[in-house]
Image (spheres, rainbow, N blue to C red):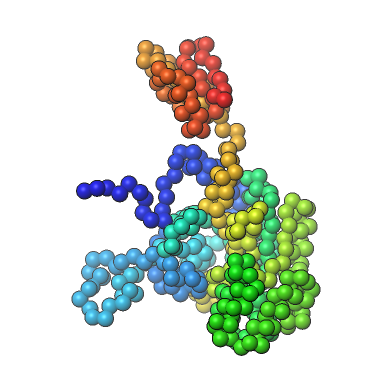
Amino acid sequence: MKVNLNPAKGMRDFTPQEKEIRDYVENVIVSTYKQSGFNLIETPVVENIENLIGSKGGENLKLIFKILKRGEKLDFSKTDICEDDLADLGLRYDLTIPLSRFYCKNQSNLPSVFKALQVGNVFRAERAQKGRYRSFKQCDIDIIGDGSSAAELELITTTAKALTALNVTDFVVRFNDRRVLKAVILNCGFLDNEFDSVCIIVDKLDKIGMSGVESELKGKNYNEECISKLMDALENISKNGTRCLSSYSVPEDVISDVEKIMNDVKDYANGKYDIEFDFTLIRGMGYYTGSIFEIAYKNLGYSIAGGGRYDEMVGNFIGQQIPAIGFSIGFERLVNQLIEEKFKVPNLEKVVLLFEKSDSYINVMKKADELRSQGYTVSVYEKSKKLGKQLNQFDGYGFSKYAVFSGDDTEVKSLS
């Protein structure tokens, strides 16, 4: 039987060089978050299916990897079986739902304001293509139990701190609020039950332009006057920002919240990065209730981090009102971009120590340990007859230096 050597569709293998960068980036992010007071937790990749499908996860609910029931629970003898009869578990599509369940289960043993850090793989049955994977890593920080704007400020500034620690500096925070979106869209005459559908279309503005948005809205047979008012609103708000929001019935306290958060972030950033109001920022998750934000990096056509306030999700598990907010770094997008920019792990001196067959291997190992004690990362290999070709190979493997074993006279040299 012919074996398919490719990973499953939408999944990936990683070379040693890629894994080296991935581990470094993850360690920097985690250490920055932990230093900022966030507590590392871990949750299972498998969740009860009812938690996933009841989570208001937008389009992601169509992308859940469902797990078949097992043993006697899997009964095909029944008539009129549907998909939901066959599955009782699923792979998590983000880290927010597992965190919400975790918090409710462990609430009595956690601080009243819990600052959580999670890193792990999530799974979505996406149409596999470049830059979109079915398994990918997320790095989340969340604050549960704080309904004030202090939570927004801490998440945004801490995420920015993690990025700058990786020398990612050319970025801007895009900021909006679901309460602003709803007020404006309803003010234009759309009905409450049309809000989500209108948002999905407006979210495409950067891809299809104003004419494309107008065309799609008309294709949904919405009221022509409502569409016209919304198109005018999009133009007006893009030019004037928060200054014109009150004319669309956005509550003054909401406008004040938005402006305060943005001004405070600008003050904290001190020119290192910027934050701007973007009314067309939607965020696809239906569970967002207030502030939503993303980080745009350089001229990429996608964000490298995103999040928002989800004040209803946690409480839904136990019937309480519990404020919550989170920010997730798009780990794969960030790493892919760093690799494309020829990112090198700093302060990593990788040395290959070469030896002859006639050398005492124990002495070679002792010399390797001696070099390691000097701060080098050392790999030991037998010396090839064609040394130049061998060194070129190790240069391609990410080694920066080499040494040929010769006892006390062993000398570390640069590969370049």
Quadrant of the drawing holding the C terminus: top right
Of the pair 124 and 108, the residue shown nearer to us: 124
**Residue drawn 47% across and 28% down?**
394
Percent x, y for residue 211? 63, 74
Can see residue 106?
Answer: no
Percent x, y for residue 119? 51, 54
Left or right of 54: which side holds 259?
right
Percent x, y for residue 124? 44, 62
Query: Which of the 4 quarters of the picture holds residue 267?
Result: bottom right
Of the pair 379 and 226, the residue shown nearer to us: 226
Rendered position, 412 above or below 1: above
Of the pair 216 and 254, the residue shown nearer to us: 216
**Residue drawn 55% across and 69% down?**
284
Query: Which of the 4 quarters of the picture holds residue 291?
Result: bottom right
Percent x, y for residue 161? 67, 51
Can see residue 81?
Answer: yes
**Residue drawn 48% across and 24% down?**
391
Rendered position, 116 above or below 362: below
**Residue drawn 43% across and 67% down?**
63
**Number of numbered discs on residues:** 0
